[in-house]
């Protein structure tokens, strides 16, 4: 890498063991051979006394890209006795490598490149080729590409292929034929390294790319997606729920859309294939296991009739395709090799609660002591699958059988719990106690149920009950349970 003639490229140094104070150790240097000898046999000169090797050839001729080789060997002779004929000689070889400078700008092999791409697709669409005469192993050869105009939506991207230095132009955002059929991009190429000062990038360092977008039959698109609606559970079968809206992106073609149910986990819905109106085909139940967080989700499919193939002059060779989707069967007539396009949309139904579940009492078994003076109180609570205000507060009372109030008493503890009290001593046995529980819905729902009350013998903090399956229970644990319920009652009333 030489800037001008007379540039020192290296220095030779020889040693002589004779007395340095005599001519016996005075050395002179000379180039006796240059290999190769092109473009000139005298490309280099050596200072006879200093041993400096300098260039004598013009920098224009010392061009790495035009030289027959990038490596030159010089045979150097050192002679003592100040170079006189009687002097002794020594020989060495100097190897000079011509390194590269970024003195050649990359140039596109063509001023115009063309590419075709299907709409809605992504990936590499064309490879741009360049020529660069600099050393391929350096940054003076490696290319950097950039898009300087024609891509306002940043739908394209260009990267360098490290293997061949080509520019790989890719679509990174799917293109829309209906919006723009043609794209014209202006691409610039530069090197990783900066060009030398007297060299610049010319017109050949830019190229134009014409990208033609080809039309395809695109699937219908639902809007909004998902579609969220709110309705009451248990509305009559056949009730209107929602109206689906799917449009065909192929606005330049007159295509019709048909709707169908794709996924309806509980089988509650139906859809008009032409209008897209969704109605109930069964009762909507908010308490169903198919409902999560009060929401029921169904998926619908929209299918176009593929007039695109016919409008583009394809052979009218129809075949009939039948497919099954849940309980629905569809038959379409389509061009061979070009089936109708489909799109899916989600419907989210937010279900409002209706008081359709009667409350129930828990637990189903309670224990009291046979002696009315001991621990003769049991706690029961209410449960309801419905949401407030169709659940608590609950009213728990004795059943309508006569005489129950002589032995038992039910007293409310809080909005969800009540206590059952034994009014007088009973013998150890199991008793079925009728209870009536009512929720707070409008109208309220009631449920007549029975709670098995085990009247047990209580001694030394142990309960001994009649049931073969019952186990001794600590009176202290039972008392602690009652206190926790009472504390929750006081907290509720103090708020």
Image (cartoon, rainbow, N blue to C red):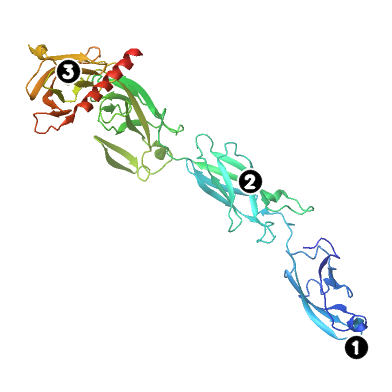
Cα distance between the residues tagged 2 and 1: 68 Å
Mark positioned earlier in the residue sequence (3 or 1): 1
Specify few, some or many for label 2: CA neighbours under 10 Å numbering under 14, 14-19, or 20 or more: some
Q: Position of residue 80 (x, y in %)?
A: 88, 83
Comparing 144 with 175, the one in front is 144
Residue at figure coordinates x 34%, y 44% from the top left: 317
Q: Position of residue 104 (x, y in %)?
A: 73, 56
Examine the image and state in which quarter residue 210 appears.
top right
Cα distance between the residues tagged 3 and 1: 136 Å
Give the label, 3 or 2, closer to the camera: 3
Q: Which residue is mark 3?
A: 420
Q: Position of residue 346 (x, y in %)?
A: 36, 31
Q: Which residue is mark 2?
A: 146
Q: Which residue is mark 1?
A: 86
Residue at figure coordinates x 29%, y 41% from the top left: 320
Residue at figure coordinates x 31%, y 39% from the top left: 333
Give the label, 2 or 1, closer to the camera: 1
Comparing 190 with 209, the one in front is 190
Residue at disc 1, secondary structure? loop
Q: Is residue 317 left or right of residue 193?
A: left
């Amino acid at each position: 890498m030489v800037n001008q003639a007379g540039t020192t490229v290296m220095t030779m140094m020889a040693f002589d063991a004779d007395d340095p104070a005599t001519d016996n150790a005075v050395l002179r240097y000379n180039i006796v051979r240059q290999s190769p000898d092109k473009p000139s046999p005298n490309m280099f000169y050596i200072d006879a006394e200093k041993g400096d090797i300098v260039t004598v050839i013009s920098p224009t001729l010392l061009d790495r890209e035009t030289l027959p080789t990038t490596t030159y060997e010089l045979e150097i002779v050192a002679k003592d006795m100040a170079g006189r004929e009687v002097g002794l000689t020594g020989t060495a070889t100097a190897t000079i490598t011509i390194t590269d400078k970024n003195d050649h700008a990359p140039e596109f092999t063509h001023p115009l490149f063309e590419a075709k791409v299907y709409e809605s697709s992504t990936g590499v669409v064309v490879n741009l080729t360049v020529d660069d005469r600099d050393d391929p192993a350096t940054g003076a050869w490696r290319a950097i590409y950039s898009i300087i105009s024609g891509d306002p939506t940043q739908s394209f991207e260009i990267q360098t292929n490290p293997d061949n230095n080509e520019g790989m132009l890719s679509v990174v955002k799917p293109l829309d034929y209906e919006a723009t059929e043609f794209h014209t991009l202006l691409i610039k190429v530069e090197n990783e390294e900066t060009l030398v000062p007297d060299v610049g990038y010319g017109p050949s360092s830019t190229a134009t790319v014409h990208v033609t977008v080809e039309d395809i039959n695109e699937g219908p698109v639902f809007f909004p997606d998902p579609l969220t609606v709110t309705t009451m559970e248990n509305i009559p079968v056949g009730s209107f729920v929602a109206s689906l809206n799917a449009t065909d992106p192929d606005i330049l073609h007159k295509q019709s859309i048909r709707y169908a149910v794709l996924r309806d986990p509980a089988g509650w819905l139906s859809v008009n294939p032409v209008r897209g109106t969704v109605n109930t085909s069964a009762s909507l139940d908010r308490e169903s296991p198919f409902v999560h967080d009060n929401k029921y989700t169904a998926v619908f499919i929209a299918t176009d009739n593929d007039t695109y193939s016919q409008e583009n002059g394809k052979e009218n060779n129809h075949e009939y395709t039948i497919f099954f989707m849940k309980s629905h069967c569809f038959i379409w007539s389509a061009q061979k090799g070009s089936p109708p396009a489909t799109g899916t949309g989600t419907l989210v139904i937010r279900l409002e609660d209706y008081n359709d579940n009667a409350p129930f009492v828990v637990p189903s078994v309670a224990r009291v002591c046979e002696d009315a003076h001991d621990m003769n109180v049991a706690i029961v609570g209410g449960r309801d699958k419905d949401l407030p205000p169709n659940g608590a507060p609950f009213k728990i009372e004795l059943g309508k059988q006569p005489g129950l109030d002589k032995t038992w008493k039910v007293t409310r503890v809080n909005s969800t719990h009540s206590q059952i009290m034994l009014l007088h001593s009973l013998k150890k046995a199991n008793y079925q106690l009728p209870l009536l529980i009512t929720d707070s819905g409008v109208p309220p729902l009631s449920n007549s149920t029975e709670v098995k009350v085990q009247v047990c013998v209580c001694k030394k903090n142990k309960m001994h009950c009649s049931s073969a399956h019952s186990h001794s229970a600590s009176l202290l644990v039972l008392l602690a349970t009652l206190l926790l319920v009472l504390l929750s009652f006081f907290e509720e009333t103090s708020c």
